[in-house]
Amino acid sequence: MTEQHGISESPQLPTPSERHRRPLTDRDRTFLEALSNGWSVRHAAVHAGRHWRRFYTLRDRDEAFAKEWQEAVEAGVDVLEQEAYRRAVEGVDEPVYQGGEMVGTVRRYSDRLLEFLIRGRRPSVYRDTAGLDARVSIVLESAFGNGAPIRGDVVDGEAREVPHELTETQKHKR
């Protein structure tokens, strides 16, 4: 405590998250490192030697740990994205066997991973529904009680009645 003008200042009180903050253990660091390498929470927890629920509890109670967790997950996603890029663009050498002996390798590329990467970077251009006119046909009974069906389309969320020919049975009902 310091004194200014004869008045002693009280120390700054910790925030609630600082009060519950404990130093990271080796297991916590191992867990966060595994997450940053792209591992799942469960695999990272096994690697760290603890049950995965323990880490979720810690994340819920400790704001600083939760922030480090999120940063580790983001770093892990970057690692996984880089691996997807490598497999899609650079390819992976796979062994070729003949008569039980490896005789060479062939480079394989993943078109599917390339598709995911492109969709992720330009979703407005490469999404499944880009450029499609969504149309759903509907048939409703007339609300006027005459039993005549009303045919319609829903196009981009807007309902439109579609004219149709009456069947012989419908013509006789009128």
Image (cartoon, helix red, strand yellow):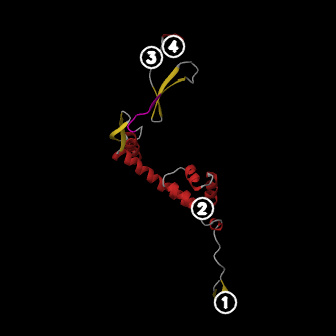
Upstream in the sequence, badge 3 or badge 1? 1
Upstream in the sequence, badge 1 or badge 2? 1
Query: Looking at the image, is 150 positioned above or below residue 8?
Result: above
Residue labelled with disc 2: 63
Task: Give me the disc on residue 6.
Answer: 1
Start-end of magenta stretch: 130-136
Q: Quadrant of the N terminus?
A: bottom right
Q: Quadrant of residue 133?
A: top left
Query: Looking at the image, is 68 positioned above or below residue 150?
Result: below
Residue labelled with disc 4: 170
Which amino acid lies under the numbered mark 3 shown in the image of this protein?
Answer: Glu
Which of these two is toward me, 13 or 67? 67
Numbered disc 4: secondary structure: helix
Upstream in the sequence, badge 1 or badge 4? 1
Residue labelled with disc 3: 165
Spot occupied by residue 22 in the image (x, y as percentages of width and height) = 63, 66
Q: CA distance from mark 1 to mark 2?
A: 37 Å
Q: CA distance from mark 2 to mark 3?
A: 66 Å
Spot occupied by residue 102 in the image (x, y as percentages of width and height) = 36, 39
Question: Magenta stretch containing residue 131, yes or no?
Answer: yes
